[in-house]
Image (spheres, rainbow, N blue to C red):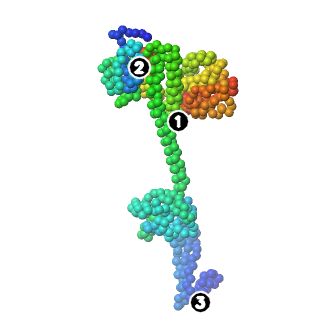
Amino acid sequence: MKKTSPEQRRRILIVEDNEKNMYLMNFLLTKSGYEIIKCGSGEEAVETAVKEKPDLVIMDIQLPGIDGLEATKRIRASEADGSIPIVAVTSYAMTGDKEKVLAAGCNGYIEKPINPETFLAEVQKYIK
Amino acid sequence: MMECYPGIENTEMFGFLRRCMKEHIPHHMENEFAFPDGSKGWYELSIYAVPEGVAILSQDITEHKRAEKEVQFKGVLLDMAADSVLVSDLSGRIIYANKAAEELRGYSGGELIGQDLHKLTTPEYAQLLNGRVAEINQKGVLTYESAHYRHDGSSFPIEVHAHLIERDGEKLILRIGRDITERKRAEERELELAKAREIDRLKSMFVASMSHELRTPLNSIIGFTGILLMGMAGELNEEQKKQLAMVKSSAGHLLTLINDVIDVSKIEAEKIQLTIEEFDLSRLVKEIKDSFAVAAEEKALKISVEMPDKAAVKSDERRIKQIIINLVSNAIKFTDKGEIGIRVAGNGKRVLISVKDTGIGIKNEDMGRLFKQFSRILVEGQPLQEGTGLGLYLSQKLARVLGGEIKAESEFGKGSEFTLTLPLEYKGG
């Protein structure tokens, strides 16, 4: 795993309402040297993403309030250049909705349950 | 008279004239005659005895006769109609009933005439009758459903088209009725079917949402077990690794079961969504083969593949992958030594993927149960294999959704071959 120096640390915004899933992703990514910003709702995610301009947003789709699709659309709408990579985390039941995820403006999706062995490699794919 | 009308003494009329003169009884007769243009007409002749002899009054009744015939003809038409035709006054007293009206209710020979429609109607509809009469009187026409009694006391549903008519200034109601027993039955059957479908749909929805809830905790079980096994949360000893690997395997099994249940409920609710794209089947099969490398190695099984370098297929890659994974994992599960052979071949329209093993095989009597849900085949002397009993059932359903089919051939003790055939291009299931 490539470790970067603190000043170059990549920042990832995780949008997830389930505490355990948040802990899991946070653990894996922090251990790998990323700086994590956490959000528990779609509304909060839109505000934070626009303000903080993270290097990646990991977006859960099923969220209280506005869902991940809507949050993604709003982030895309308020960005000047649409440059923040957003990767959706979808459950198996949602896979038929791959098109919906992409249409909302996500760059791709990672399927739940998260496989720790492949998760980091998948995340890295989306970071510029 | 005999001078004026030679030969009159031989006619029938002459006999009447003589009788009238002798017995003073008036006589009427109607006779047909021909107009100069050849058309038929009728005249009436009345003979009265008068003091001077006899008076003969003659009248052309052609128009009257025609009208009478027309009425008779219309009566015949009404009697031939299959629908019940009833005419009643506003109080419900029947003054006309056609043959169908009688037959439908088990009456004959004018028995319905004079009866009260209220008494021919079952109580629940009889109480509505006066209101309906008022409505017919106001609107002129009305269509409604009712139930009428037969002569034997049984009843039947009837659809009535009622019209307000007038005769000599008296308001009457014409009711054309049709027995709708069959239609009612069909409606009831349809209703029951719709109810059954709704229950089925609710059941599938329940299963789908329940499965989602069941899967959420699995996300952290699988995730954290993985982290622990990777040593990311600290070093583990061999026993800890072994036990955690069992937790991970069981969690994986549970996940497969839940996913299968979701898929089955989606297919049964006809809610499965397909993603149709062109992909290389050979690449997919290679990926699947590689993903089973460890499992095959553990049982010292060889996986051989025979396929073209590239095989373009337009279908749902994910679903096809699911089917092939199911077939290969079954083959490994039920094979202790030998090899698993995967073969891909096409014929221009269809593609065939076969998975052949040298495993325990399937007895002839078990072949019929292979694709049934929750059916698991127990072989004597063999442990019952871990499974959901949904794998082949689901695979076959998916294959059909994709317009294909899975066929199985097997020789007990020697091995099995499962062949999936699919259209090269998906064009509906």
- State whether residue A11 is above or below residue B363: above
Same chain for the residues at labels 1 and 2, yes or no? no
Q: Which mark is residue B268?
A: 1
* Quadrant of the rendered image containing residue A121: top left
- State whether residue B148 is above or below residue A34: below
Q: Is residue B153 visible?
A: yes
Residue density around tag 1, few if under 14, some if 14–19, many if 20 or more, within 10 Å: some
Report the residue at 45% width, 20% height from top.
B224
Q: Is residue B76 visible?
A: no
Question: Which three-letter amino acid code belongs to the residue tagged 2?
Answer: Met
Question: Which three-letter amino acid code belongs to the residue tagged 3?
Answer: Lys
Report the residue at 44% width, 14% height from top.
B234
Residue B379: x %, y % from top left: 65, 28
Residue density around tag 3, few if under 14, some if 14–19, many if 20 or more, within 10 Å: few
- State whether residue B164 is above or below residue B297: below
* Residue furthest out toward the bottom: B51
Dot 3 corresponds to which residue?
Answer: B22
Secondary structure category for the residue under label 1:
helix
Dot 2 corresponds to which residue?
Answer: A25
Question: Which three-letter amino acid code belongs to the residue tagged 1?
Answer: Glu
Secondary structure category for the residue under label 3:
helix
Same chain for the residues at labels 2 and 3, yes or no? no
**In the foreground, B133 or B253:** B253
The quarter in which the C terminus of chain B is drawn is: top right
Q: Are marks 2 and 3 in contact (CB under 8 Å)?
A: no
Disc 1 and disc 2: Cα gap in Å? 35 Å
Protein chain holding label 1:
B
